[in-house]
Each structure stands twice: as structure tokens, then as C-alpha cells.
Amino acid sequence: MFCHALLFGAALSVYAVLGFGKLTEKDVIVEVYYGDVDAHGRIQNGKSAPMRSAGIIEGGLCRFAGEVPCDKTGEQGFQIRVIPSHPDLAQKHEMALITWA
């Protein structure tokens, strides 16, 4: 379990390195999903924040960066999620495909 004390009002910088195979970073939405955690470490009533592309690194991997705001006290958790993105989709969860990291 990761434990890091942050001051209220600060932000935790979050980075992810992802490989998409034949897809590109424009084919997906990458988000950090965060919130209170229960006794089993599961995020309850989570919120999401977008992550931005921070460039391509060796091997065709894409680096993404984002932040988790420290806007409440208590035990918090976060995960990275990747969702398909396409202009023809009415909303981001339409395909019901999410990959968690």
C-alpha cells in the first residue's frame, strides 16, 4: 500500500507510461480516478480528472501526466483508467470498455 502525506490544498502528480499497440494516444482518453477508499482499499464515490499526453518515449510507449487534488482529508486512493475515444461516440462510456492500471 502506498502512503504519502500531503497538505490540504496541494496536488499529487501522477504519471503513467502506456502502450497502445496499433492505436495512438488520440484514440483514447486517459484519466486518473480517485476518491475515498473503503476498508478493502476500493475507491468509493470516485471522481476522474483528465491526464494529458506528455510525449512518446522509446519503444512507442506514451507518457501521460495528471494530478490528484488534495481537497479532502482521510485515506484516499487512485487508479489510472483508459477509455476509447472517437468523434462518433455520443459519450465516453458508450462502448463500455475501460482498462484499469
Image (cartoon, rainbow, N blue to C red):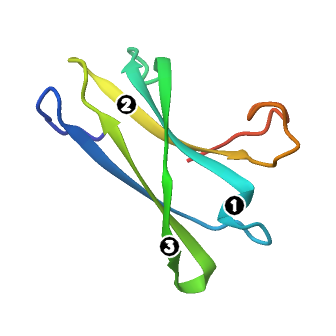
Question: Which residue occupies 69% across, 53% down?
Answer: 28
For the residue labelled by badge 2, is the local secondary structure a helix, a strand or a loop?
A: strand
Foreground residue, 70 or 44? 70
Q: Foreground mark, 1 or 2? A: 1
Three-letter code for the amino acid on which mark 2 is drawn: Gly
Q: CA distance from mark 1 to mark 2?
A: 27 Å
For the residue labelled by badge 1, is the local secondary structure a helix, a strand or a loop?
A: helix
Q: Where is mark 2, residue-wise?
A: 77
Q: For this view, does 18 lie left or right of residue 95?
A: left
For the residue labelled by badge 3, is the local secondary structure a helix, a strand or a loop?
A: strand
- Which circle marks residue 26 in the picture? 1
Q: For this view, does 63 lie left or right of residue 8?
A: right
Question: Which residue occupies 75% across, 48% down?
Answer: 85
Q: For this view, does 8 lie left or right of residue 34?
A: left
Q: CA distance from mark 3 to mark 2?
A: 26 Å
Extreme bottom residue here? 58
- Which circle marks residue 55 in the picture? 3
Quadrant assignment, res 31: top right
Relative image position of residue 46 (x, y in whole percent): 48, 21
Relative image position of residue 23 (x, y in whole percent): 77, 66
Of the image marks 1 and 2, the number of the one nearer the N terminus: 1
Of the image marks 1 and 3, the number of the one nearer the N terminus: 1
Of the image marks 3 and 2, the number of the one nearer the N terminus: 3
Q: Foreground mark, 3 or 2? A: 3
Proximity of marks 1 and 3: CB atoms separated by less than 8 Å:
no
Extreme right residue here? 88
Question: Which residue occupies 85% across, 38% down?
Answer: 89
